[in-house]
Every structure is written in C-alpha cells, then in structure tokens.
Image: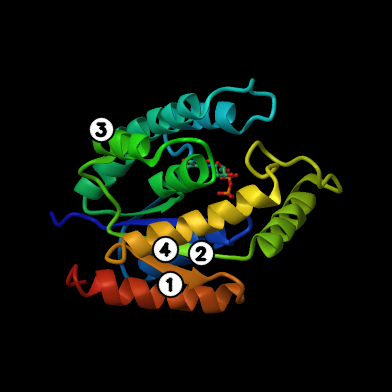
Amino acid sequence: MALGQFITLEGGEGSGKSTQARLLEQRLRDNGLEVTMTREPGGSLFGEHLRNVLLDSKTPEHSALSEALLFYAARADHLENKIRPALAAGRWVVCDRFSDSTRAYQGYAGALQLEAIDTMDQLVVAPTFPDLTVIIDIDPAIGMARADQRRAERDGSNTTRRDRFEGRDRTFHDALRQGFLTIAANNPGRCVVIDGSRDADSIGAQIWQVVATRLLQEAGT
Ligand code: TYD
C-alpha cells in the first residue's frame, strides 16, 4: 500500500491552526482519502498524559532541557503508536503542531540550543519528517487577542486563565513568530507560510491549493 502523507500545521497562539486542521481534514476526506487527525503535545494515551503535565500552570518550574525532553518523550510515543502505523496503512496524517513547535517555542523563543533539538529530532522523529508543514503567520497582538476571546467563550468570562505558554510576554511571542519564519526560510521544500490575518475560508482555500499542488499530484491521487 502507498504510504500516506504527513502534514503538520504550525503557528503562534491564536493563529487559527486548529480550525484549519479540521477544514483540511474534511477536504481530504471529501477527496476520498483516509485521514488521521492528531495533535501535539498529545495524540496518544501517554502523550496526552504528558500534555497535562506540560500545559498545567501548576507544574513546577523546570529547565528548558527537561521540558524539551518531555515534549520529545510524548512525541516518541505519538510517532510509534499513532503516526507511523497510520502512514504505513496508507492514511494521511494531519497533525496540529509537531517538532517545529519545539524548535520555535523552546529553541528560538526559549533557552534551548537548536543543536539539542536537532539531536532529539534525529533520535525520535527520523525518518518520519513531515512531507508538508503549513505555518500560519499572525501578528502576536492579533493572535493573543483571538486566543483570549476563544478562552472566554469556552470558559465563561475568565480571560486570565492562560496556559504556561500563552501566559508569556510579548517579547516571547515576537521571538516565536520570527522563529517560525526562520524555520520556513531554512526549509523551503517542506514549509509554506500562510497569512493568518485573513478569514478562515480564504486561509483554508490557500492551504488546500498548496496541498493539491504539492502532495495530491505527487501521490497520484
Ligand atoms: P494548545 O492548547 O494545543 O495550544 P494551541 O491551540 O496554540 O496549539 O497548547 C499547546 C501549547 O504547547 C502551545 O502553547 C505551544 C506549546 N508547545 C511547545 O511549547 N512545544 C512543543 O513542542 C509543542 C508541540 C507545543
């Protein structure tokens, strides 16, 4: 059976990635493809368990390296138990965040050396690197406001309950944005940057165009 294609969606807070992941899933299904939708941190039983630890604002302070190792522990399990079996069964995998998030959050915007992330990528991810990574670029001021609004709608009027990453300051979110753009510039064959300031349908149409040109034709679908 032909291998499925592995697509990751990346971006800062409030970039609209999760909405786009769902739109993409639906379009792929409409084209007769089998799709596995997943996310990081999480995606597998062990991964979701670690997600709770990683995002909980009550988690004690720990080093950037400890944190990155936890993300990669979750990722190793996710790859082994969900992503690789799905791809081997010919399914397409759409993943909301993957190792570019570690590179951007813990590397470019955090305190971890990029070489350490490269090493973990080789150990854990290789050879299952994404076929396509869609990076949704958004001004952090707009993204943070959107994320606050989404949280308010979900949790009632409490807009202050940000998770450990959402709670960081503007400098962090600016560095994050630049980090994602640098990743895209360094990996033009794999990454595409999409303007996230437009409406969800326009962004969805643009992502679909990229998927159709880069992957569907290649896969002979
Ligand atoms: P989530 O609620 O899934 O946020 P979003 O809707 O923005 O995707 O929380 C995931 C958080 O974890 C997000 O703030 C980014 C962060 N993260 C890292 O810092 N490193 C990583 O490797 C991953 C996968 C996520």
Amino acid tagged 4: Val
The reply to whether dot 4 and dot 2 touch (C-beta < 8 Å) is yes
N-term-proximal mark, 3 vs 4 = 3
N-term-proximal mark, 3 vs 1 = 3
Regarding residue 101, the answer to whether it shows in the image is yes
Q: Which mark is residue 123?
A: 3
Residue 221 point in image, percent of width and height: 21, 71
Label 2 neighbour load within 10 Å: few <14, some 14-19, many 20+ = many
Question: Could you tell me which residue is drawn at 34 percent across and 71 percent down?
Answer: 211
* Location of residue 35 with respect to 185 vertically, above or below: above
N-term-proximal mark, 3 vs 2 = 3
Amino acid tagged 3: Leu
The quarter of the rendered structure image containing the N terminus is: bottom left
N-term-proximal mark, 2 vs 1 = 2
Circle 2 residue: 136
Q: CA distance from mark 4 to mark 1?
A: 7 Å
Circle 4 residue: 134
Q: CA distance from mark 4 to mark 2?
A: 6 Å
Q: CA distance from mark 3 to mark 4?
A: 23 Å
Circle 1 residue: 207
Residue 96 point in image, percent of width and height: 47, 51
Specify whether tag 3 is near ligand 1 (CB below 8 Å). no
Relative to 173, is 214 on the left or the right? left
Secondary element at image label 3: helix
Amino acid tagged 1: Ile
Label 4 neighbour load within 10 Å: few <14, some 14-19, many 20+ = many
The reply to whether dot 4 and dot 1 touch (C-beta < 8 Å) is yes
Q: Quadrant of ligand 1?
A: top right
Question: Could you tell me which residue is drawn at 50 percent across and 60 percent down?
Answer: 22
Label 1 neighbour load within 10 Å: few <14, some 14-19, many 20+ = many
Secondary element at image label 2: strand
Could you say which is closer to the camera, residue 39 or residue 188?
188
